Amino acid sequence: QKEVEQDPGPLSVPEGAIVSLNCTYSNSAFQYFMWYRQYSRKGPELLMYTYSSGNKEDGRFTAQVDKSSKYISLFIRDSQPSDSATYLCAMTFMNSGYSTLTFGKGTMLLVSP
Amino acid sequence: EPEVTQTPSHQVTQMGQEVILRCVPISNHLYFYWYRQILGQKVEFLVSFYNNEISEKSEIFDDQFSVERPDGSNFTLKIRSTKLEDSAMYFCASSEGAGDPYGYTFGSGTRLTVV
């Protein structure tokens, strides 16, 4: 069983739509959950970061974690063409001061004007 | 805003050659990492480095790979004898430490093409 599963998409939506991106994971030791945005041939850029179950909001973005179901989500409200990118979920746990991130495969999002 | 800088952005090398990928982490960060992403695949952890030694390495990081912090600013990944399957994007990252991944910052990557 793969540690982190993420539907690769692509997910195509019109501008202004609400987008829902999801990941499931199998390792209950994961404590920190992140969402990264990655543009083509660029490095991952951190969008959201949380370590507890529940919701965390930042502008148009809401990260949701359900540890009991091992399921995390990222919601994007009022999506814009500039949101078109690949969204990677990543997770980690405390380990003597450093963190090794385990990534999902990424979901490609296309927002059309 | 502080950033992680990687050079070169693209490197083409012949199979069997040695390559060195270079990174300048954020200046006050203490932990350094290399990840790679084969085209169409997940970003995968290679190695973490702290206090001038490897903290953890993955199965991918075999004897062909090595890392070094030759001076106070650079962090390098060396592949001794490149194989076709080493073709990938290689990302350097750094973090402040204490296990908090909030400050975990990635560079823009080096695209390595082995021919």
Image (cartoon, coloured by chain):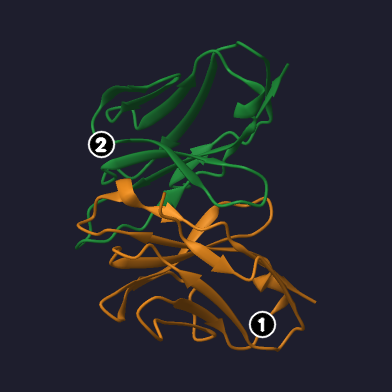
In the image shown, does B28 or A63 lie closer to the viewer? Answer: B28
Rendered location of residue B34, percent (x, y): 46, 67
Q: Is residue B33 above or below residue A84?
A: below
Lateral position of residue B21 relative to residue A26, left or right: right
Q: Secondary structure at mark 2?
A: loop
Q: At 66% from the left edge and 82% from the top edge, which residue is drawn?
A: B82
Q: CA distance from mark 2 to mark 1?
A: 39 Å
Query: Label 2 crowding class (10 Å Cα cut-off): few <14, some 14-19, many 20+?
Result: some
Residue B60 visible in the current orientation: no
Any mark on residue A51, and which?
2
Rendered location of residue B15, percent (x, y): 74, 84
Judging by colour alone, the chain drawn in orange in this rendered image is B
The image quarter in which residue B8 lies: bottom right
Residue furthest out toward the right? B115
Judging by colour alone, the chain drawn in green in this rendered image is A
Could you confirm whether marks 2 and 1 are on the same chain?
no
Chain containing mark 1: B
Q: Are marks 2 and 1 in contact (CB under 8 Å)?
A: no
Q: Is residue A70 above or below residue A44?
A: above
The image quarter in which residue B14 lies: bottom right
